[in-house]
Amino acid sequence: MKFRLSMCVVLILCFQAVRAGQDTTWRNAAIDTSMGGGTPQSTAVQSPVAEAGRRSLRFDTGHVDVAWGLTGNLQDYRGRKEFDYQSAVPQGKSLWEQFWRWFWTKWSQLMSREGFRVGFKAFLWAASIGILLYAVLRVLGMEKVRFWMGAQGRGQGIRGEIVEDIHAIDYETSIGEAENEGRYRDAIRFHFLRSLKLMSDREVIRWNRNKTNIDYTRELSAHRLAGPFEQIRRIYEYAWYGEFPVSREDYLALHPYFSGFDKMVSP
């Protein structure tokens, strides 16, 4: 039994030795071939490196005819735009288009920031609410100064005096001073207050400093003065609350509306 095991071990060792010898022969043959030593004769297997070494390079000796696509005078081609490769090619977009492209690119970059998006939405909401409130106040006829400036809304006049009572104003003097000093918006205001005083004296309206112009319009809804009063009310509100500049020419054109209304109240 021991003899058989010994023989098996010997055969295995011999097989390993033969295999190792073949690998060594293959490596030596590849090295000799790459160094120009020729093809080894001791082995039947040829290395791919040795096979490539036997190949030789072949040069193409054929004649090539160059065919030109341009015929005729070359100077004619130099003058054509399609053959001008040195001039700058136009972009095809105007400055206006380039500006908007730049604008929307910057806008997209800003909108990609979370903080900017939140702030912009808050601004839109605040602006929308402000515009809505202003529109409601204008429709209701509430005085802008009364709403925003408190003190002036309680009757503060043009030159600092407190207009608590329209019956206590010297209209002839106040209107004359405003006209002489070129304060035509002030003059229009005094004309309107005098018209309210005349209607109050005639008991056409019930004047109260806490009332708004729309309140007087409602009181006159069924009166013959409703239309004319609406005209002078709009003139007064546009000039005074709208803060539109009133020139001398504008004042001379608007003055007849107030004088005509006063004559209708006190014929």
Image: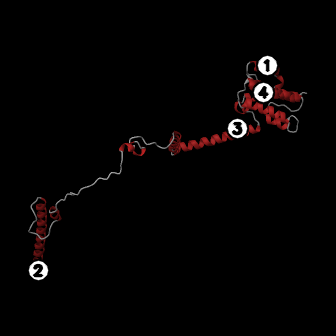
Which mark is first along the chain, 3 or 1?
3
Q: Residue furthest front?
A: 72
Residue at coordinates 84% horizontally, 33% vertically from top-left?
228
- In the picture of the structure, the residue carrying the numbered disc 2 is 4
Say whether marks 1 and 3 touch (CB < 8 Å).
Answer: no
- Badge 3, how many Cα within 10 Å: few under 14, some, many 20+? some
Residues under labels 4 and 2: Cα distance?
139 Å
- In the picture of the structure, the residue carrying the numbered disc 1 is 176
Q: Amino acid at mark 4?
A: Ala
Residue at coordinates 53% horizontally, 43% vertically from top-left?
104
Which quadrant would residue 36 be assigned to in this image? bottom left
Residues under labels 4 and 1: Cα distance?
17 Å
Q: Is residue 221 left or right of residue 82?
A: right
Q: Amino acid at mark 2?
A: Arg
Residue at coordinates 77% horizontally, 31% vertically from top-left?
235
- Badge 1, how many Cα within 10 Å: few under 14, some, many 20+? few
Q: Nearer the viewer, mark 1 or mark 2?
A: 1
Residue at coordinates 65% horizontally, 42% vertically from top-left?
128
**Residue 253, label in figure:** 4
Which mark is first along the chain, 3 or 4?
3
Give the structural element (helix, strand or loop) at label 1.
helix
Above or below: residue 75 compared with residue 23: above
Residues under labels 2 and 3: Cα distance?
115 Å
